[in-house]
Image (cartoon, rainbow, N blue to C red):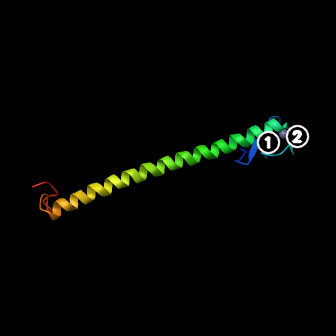
Amino acid sequence: MPAKPGLTERACPHCREPVAATASRCPNCRAEFTAEDVQRTVSANVQGILFGLICLSLLLMAVMWWQERYDAAAAAHLNGIENGTIDPLTDQPK
Ligand SMILES: [Zn+2]
């Protein structure tokens, strides 16, 4: 079974062995690739990386948003204890 191609590799359309994304010829079966084949693989890999980065940024933004809300709630709670509107023993409003 051929190995799974990595980000800088792709599967040869003829023998399915991984070859460098920019290779113009398969080192395994000697099949030649067109410039269009090479370009298509490179842009697909770049799109994959961009998609990953976008997902990562969205996740980071969600975590930051949640943390901000959590901090605000914790600060409001501590204020409530300080000014006597929340009972520190029961953690409930008086
Ligand atoms: Zn091949």
Q: Secondary structure at mark 1?
A: loop
Left or right: where 56 falls relative to 12: left
Relative to 57, is 82 above or below?
A: below
The N terminus, quarter of image: top right
> Does the Cβ of the disc 2 residue fall within 8 Å of ligand 1?
yes
Position of 70 compared to 80: left or right?
right
The residue sitting at the bottom extreme is 82
Q: Report the residue marked by disc 2.
A: 29
Q: Amino acid at mark 1?
A: Glu
How far apart in space, not on screen, are marks 1 and 2 (Cα)? Answer: 9 Å
Q: What quarter of the picture does the C terminus occupy? A: bottom left
**In this view of the protein, which residue sits in the foreground, 20 or 72?**
72
Q: Is residue 15 visible?
A: no
Residue 26 shows in the view: yes
- What residue sits 71% from the left and 41% below the top? 43
Q: Residues at badges 1 and 2 in contact (C-beta under 8 Å)?
A: yes
User: Which residue has dot 1 on it?
Assistant: 17
19 on left or right of 56: right
